[in-house]
Image: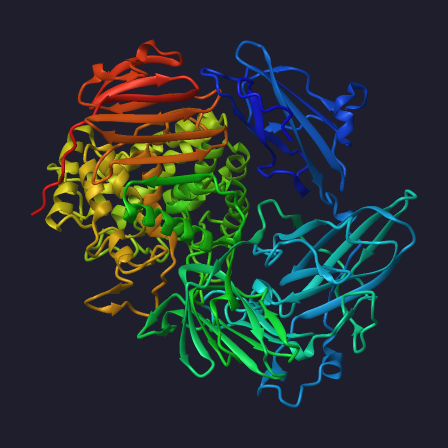
Amino acid sequence: MTRTVNPSLLTPYALQTEQRTELLGMGEWHPRLSWKLRCHRRAAAQSAYRITASERPEDLDTPGRLMWDSGRRAASDTLFIPWDGPALTSATRYHWRVEVWDENGIPGASAQSWFETGLLHPDDWTAVWVGRDLVNLSHFDPPLDDDPEGSALQSPPLQVRCAFQLPDRPVRARLYATARGVYEPRLNGSRVGDAELAPGWTEYHRRLQYQTYDVTDRVTEGPNVLAAIVADGWWSGYVGFDPRRAAQHYGDRPAFLAQLVVDLADGSRKVVATGPQWTEQPGAVRSADLLMGQNVDARRHTPGWDTVDTEPAGFSPVAVLDTEPGPLVSEPDHPIRVTRQVPAATVHPRGPGRYIVDFGQNLVGRIQLTVRNAERGRRIVLRHAEVLTDGELYVDNLRRAQATDIYTASGAGTEVFEPQFTIHGFRYAEVDHYPVSLTADDVVARVVHNDTPWTGTFECSDTDVNQLQSNIAWGQRGNFLAVPTDCPQRDERLGWLADAQVFAPTASRNADVSAFFARWMHDVRDGQDEDGAFRDVAPLMTLDREAAPAWGDAGVIIPWHLWRTYGDLRVLEQSYDAMTAWVEHIRRHNLDLRWRKRTGNSYGDWLQVGVTTPRDVLSTAYFAHSTQIVAAAAEALGRSQEATHYRNLHAAIRAAFIDSYINDDGTIEGRTQTGYLLALAYGLLPDWLLEAAVGHLAADIEKRNTTLTTGFVGTALLCPVLTDHGKPDLAYALLHQDEYPSWGHSISHGATTIWERWDGWTEHSGFQSAAMNSFNHYSLGSVGDWLFGRVAGIDQTPSSVAYSELLLRPQPGGRLTWARAEQDSARGRITCGWNLADGLLTVACSVPPGVTAMLHMPTADPGSVQEGGAPAADRPGVLAVEPHPAGAAVRLASGHYVISAVAPELTSPTTS
C-alpha cells in the first residue's frame, strides 16, 4: 500500500517480490525486491532507499521489532534488490516497506507490500500421491441404462474427498496442492481460488508446480471437508499432434497431492494431507481432455459430496500411488485464470434445437451455457471453430482435436454448464439439441490464459492499424497458456521456440511476461542435450531432435531479452552455460563457421511467400547473432575473458558470412527479403555495402507492388530494418497494404487474431491446407514491437537495461495523423505519442523518475523545436537540443513534456 498521493513527492509503487505482487507461496530462498517510481516533478530521481521487514505489518513502525533493516543505502537501484535479511522459513508471511529519498536527499513517500513463503524444504511435505483404485472402479461406477454407447469405457476424472475435524477456531490456514493432471480444489462445498488448469505444464520429470491458497476464511471449528476433482490435463491426456495420449510421456492416470496446514487459536497446528484415509468416486464429469473436450452428465452429480452436510454413499478408499512428493516447486509466475467474458454477438438458428453462435472475437477459453427447461437425460452438444464455411463450423483445421463439450441435463429446471478441464480456440460455437429457443443471454465465452499483467497500449488514427494491434493482443492472450503455444485450437499447442523468440519483444510491450518466460526457460534448458543442442519445443513432449536454426537460438535470445527488458540478471546467470553450450555445439560441427551441418529440421524462414531464403544464409546469420549475444551476456555477467572469446568468434563468423553470401554489388545469396533483413539487422554487411543492400531490399518490395515475402523469421525484422535504414515510407506502405500477402489482407476478411499463414484464406484459393492452418498464431504479429518502438517511439538505447536510458523515436508516416503508446516498464510509466496538425509535429512524452531520454524529433527545421511557446532548450528538464539527421535530438530528464516543431516532409514509396 502507498502512504501518500502527493504528486510532488518521489513515490514508489507496484512493489514486487520475484516479479510478482503480494506473492503467496514463494519458493525462492533468496528473493529479490523491486519497485517503480513516479513523480510529477521534472528531473526527479532516487538517490537512496531503505528497506525494512517484519513478520507483522504493525511492527514495521517499531524499529525494535524489525527483523531486517537495510539502513539508508545511497543508490538509484529499484530492481531486483536482494533480500539481505535473516534466512527465510517455510510458510511464513513477511511484510516489507521501502522508503526513498529524491535527487536532493529529501525524503519521498514510502510503500509496503508482503510475500509469503511456500514449503521450502522437501521435508515440509507429509502428503502422499493418491489416485483411483482401479480394482474397485467398476464396483462403484456402474453405467446408467441410457449412457451413450462407449461412455462406460471412458476414464472419468478423480473426485476425491477427506473429512476432518478442527478442535478450535483457525487463525491461519494454507492449502498447498498440485496434481499429476489438472485439478480444481474444493473446501466445504465451494471451489478454492481462481486458478485454472493448475498446476500448468512444465517438464514434469524435472519440475511439478504446486499452488498455495489462503483458506483461512474457508475452514471452521468442527467438521470440514477437503476435496478435489482431477482430470488428465497435460499429464495423461492428449497433447500435441502425437496420436498417443500423454501417458506415453508422463503417466497413465491422474493423481492428487495436497497438504492443508491449519494454525489454531490455541497455538497448535493441524495438518490434513492426502493419504490412504481419503476416498474417491467418479462424479458428473465423465471425461475431460484439453484437446478433445469435456463430457458432463449432471445426473451423476453427487449432492453434498464435498460438504459436511452429508456422508455420500459409494465412495471407496483411494490408492496410494507414490509416497515421495517428487520434484515439487512453487508456482513462480501468474496463474492461468478466466480474465474476461465475451458475450454472444449473434445467435443464428440452423435447424430444430441447433444454433451457431458468433462471439465476434476469436479467443481461447470455454463457453458457459445456461440450460433452461431441459428434460432429464437431454444431451446438449457444443462444438467450437475459429471460422465458418457456408454458415457452418469449419473444423477441418482442428485435425484430431474434437473440441466438443457434452452436457447431459439432470432435469432440474435451470442448469449451468461450464467445462473446467478443457480449452478451445474459437470465435464460433454450435449448440445442438438445446431444449428451447437459445438467446444471446444464455451463452457467454470465458477467456482463459496466464494472467500476465497488461502493461502496454498502442493506438493511432487508423482503424485498420488499431485492429492489427488488437489482433496481436488477442493472439498473445490465447497462446500464452501454460507455455507460449503455437496455436490454441488444433492437436498441437506446443511451446515452439522460434515462435516465442520472434514474438517476445512484442509480448513484453503488451504485458509483463518476465516471470512467465523466466519459468518457461527452465523447460527450454531441460530439453538441451549433452552436446549442447536445444530442442524445437519445450516442454519436450515430442520432436525429440536437435533444434533448427532460429528455433534453438531462442535459448540464447530470450534470456538476453529478459535481461535487457526487465533487468533480470538471474535468468541470464541461470541460462548462460546453456547459451554457450548451444553456440559451441554449432561451432564444433561447423568448423568453417558456415552453419550447414547439424541444423535439425531446418525450417528456414517458415511460411515465407513465393521465395526460398537459402537455409545456410539464415542459419549462419543466426549463428553470428547468438554468438554476439553470448559475448554481450558474458560482459554483463563480468566474464571478460569469455566475452573477448565470443567477440572474436562473432567477428570470424561475420567474416565467413560476408565471404560466403555477400556479393560485391551488395546482393545476398538468394536475393530474398529475409536474407537482406538478417544481414542488415544482425550487422553482417560491410559498411560500404549497406546502402546497396538496403536498395536491393527496397527494390524487391517495390517490384512486388509493395508486398512482403517474409515468413516467421523475416517478418519480425521487416519494418524495424526498413525504418532504421531510411525507408520508413516502405514500412508504412507494408503496414497499410491490404492485398495478399499482408496483415491488412486478413483484417479485410474479418480476422480478429493473427493468422498462422498469410494465405490462411484467400478469395482465389479459399482455405489453405487443413493440415496446418491456424487462425490464431502470434508469430506474424511480431510487428507489434515496431508499432510501440518506432511508430509511437518508445525504445531504449543499446546500452540501456530495463529502459534506464530511453530512445524516443516517433516516426510519423503513412496515412496516420497521430499515434501514441504507453508502457508501464520495470522502472515506471513511459508514454510517447505524436500528432500532425497545421504544419506542426507535436510530441508528448513521459519519462519516469531516474530515467533519461533522448528524443529524436523528426522535423524539417531543427531550430523550430519548442515547448510552451519557448525554445525547448530553455525549459526545465530539457538537458540539450542538438541537430540530428532528419531533425533534432532533445535530451530529457524525467518528467512529462509536450514539444513541437515544424513537421517533417513525408514521402511515399514508389511502386512498379
Residue 581 to residue 801: above or below:
below
Relative to 159, is 64 on the left or the right?
A: right
Expressed as whole percent of the image width and height from the top left, the position of residue 328 reads: 67, 51
The quarter of the rendered structure image containing the N terminus is top right
Colour scheme: rainbow
Compare residues 430 and 398 and report the one nearer the observer: 430
Expressed as whole percent of the image width and height from the top left, the position of residue 266 reads: 92, 44
The answer to which image quadrant residue 70 occupies is top right
Q: Residue sitting at 39 percent across and 50 percent down?
A: 498
Residue 814 to residue 810: above or below:
below
Q: Residue sitting at 62 percent across and 56 percent down?
A: 199
Expressed as whole percent of the image width and height from the top left, the position of residue 455 reads: 47, 39
Residue 568 to residue 201: above or below:
above
Residue 683 to residue 496: above or below:
above
Quick check: can you spot residue 303?
yes
Expressed as whole percent of the image width and height from the top left, the position of residue 119 reads: 74, 45
Quick check: can you spot residue 497?
no
**Residue farthest left in this picture:** 912
Compare residues 759 and 325 and report the one nearer the observer: 759
Compare residues 408 and 622 and report the one nearer the observer: 408
How many badges with numbers are in the image? 0
Compare residues 474 and 518 and report the one nearer the observer: 474
Relative to 407, is 497 on the left or the right?
A: left
The answer to which image quadrant residue 17 occupies is top right
Relative to 14, is 590 on the left or the right?
A: left
